[in-house]
Amino acid sequence: MRRFFLRKEQIKDLAKKVGETYRLIYPTLKDGVITYVEWKGEELAFPEKVKEYQSPGFYRIYSGEEGILNGWTHGMNSPKEFLHPKNLTFLRISKDLEQELPELKGGFAFFGIRNCDLTAVKVLDRVFKDDVFYNKLREGNLFIVANCVKPSDTCFCTSVGGSPFSAEGFDLAITELKDGFLISVGSPKGQEILDGLSLLEATREQLEEEKALKQRAVESMKKAFSFENLPERLLKRVDDTCWEAMEKRCLACGSCTMVCPTCFCYEVKDEFLSGGEFERIREWDSCFRLGFSETHHIPIRKSIASRYRHWLLHKFSYWFYQFSTLGCVGCGRCITWCPVGIDVREEVRRVLNA
Ligand code: SF4
Ligand code: SF4
């Protein structure tokens, strides 16, 4: 794998070069939260010199001296928002009954996403394998991962088989060093982006610096639970009374499913517009909604506890039997954005030990 050194001031040149060919999605600070947005030619504003703090039910950004990529891990949104949009109009019918299929365009470059989010895209690829809309938006994408030098307290990727540093599946991976960035090339498409930037090969010292940062990042992450046979061990608890505790604790607000980079459920709605036009839209849904499991007007999962059980077991157990992978990548967003601070790591431990 080829490794190059990029000077601090060149990071925007790199992003702009990407934006010449791709629909650049980049991280910025919006309404006090790190957010991935599409670049429309404005001055690129990376979340520079900020320090993000995440804990159960808590998210804050403070000012800091952490460079450009190292003071934060990720905010609320993820590539899911672009590949499986919240609201997707996929059919329009005029008042003369002419059908129009809106054009869906991929070609995104996800700049500065974290390894958990790259893994989440690979999970979505399995879920949406035969989905025509997802596959259109997934076409021609580029992944530029920012390795996590300082994982958040809510991160637990190493407990579900992941890592804060990306080893494969990216086009470019960036590690922010003291004086610049170390760029690893993962594909010919990634190399093409670097061509013309006149970068020097990384030195032995720079490679050593990255190695030490990686080791420190991995060691800083506590094991949330044992990964061994997790789907089977959890499945054994399906009829346990331990789930009842969630009836009073969980609000069934669905926030966890909205921010999760792999939760994919949606419903299809028809909307009649003024002038006799009509649209068919697919919109994110949540398994925490009472009506979600409605069959013949009767919800199958009436209690909140049964909905929490379904969500957790789907992520950490059933998903494995459906898609040969877990549905959780350990990003910790559901922990941060749960309004009552329910920590899924604690719940998995509690259920396993019940
Ligand atoms: S279940 Fe929670 S930690 Fe796992 S991928 Fe979804 S949001 Fe991230
Ligand atoms: S676990 Fe938290 S975020 Fe998820 S539905 Fe329950 S209260 Fe809402």
Image (spheres, grey):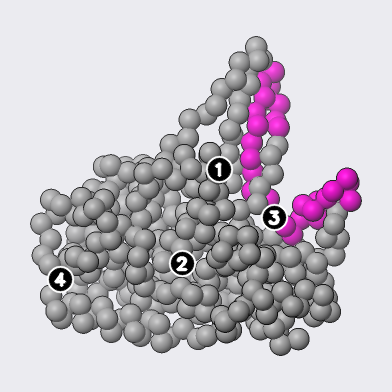
Q: Earlier in the sequence, mark 1 or mark 4?
A: 1
Q: Which residue is mark 3?
A: 286
Residue 44 in view (yes/no): yes
Between circles 1 and 2, the one closer to the viewer is 1
Give the side of residue 238 with respect to residue 54, left or right: right
> Where are the magenta residues, as a range?
270-298
Beta carbon at label 2 within 8 Å of ligand 1 = yes
Q: Amino acid at mark 1?
A: Asp
Q: Which residue is mark 4?
A: 202
Q: Are marks 4 and 2 in contact (CB under 8 Å)?
A: no
Q: Are marks 3 and 1 in contact (CB under 8 Å)?
A: no
Residue 116's disc number: 2
Image point 47% across, 78% down: which residue? 158
Q: Is residue 1 above or below residue 159?
A: above
The quadrant the N terminus occupies is bottom left
Q: Is residue 315 above or below residue 198?
A: below
The quadrant the C terminus occupies is bottom right
Q: Earlier in the sequence, mark 1 or mark 2?
A: 2
Image point 19% across, 73% down: which residue? 179
Q: At numbered mark 4, what does the secondary structure look like: helix, strand or loop?
A: loop
Q: Which residue is mark 1?
A: 131
- In whole angstroms, how far apart are the C-alphas of marks 4 and 2? 25 Å
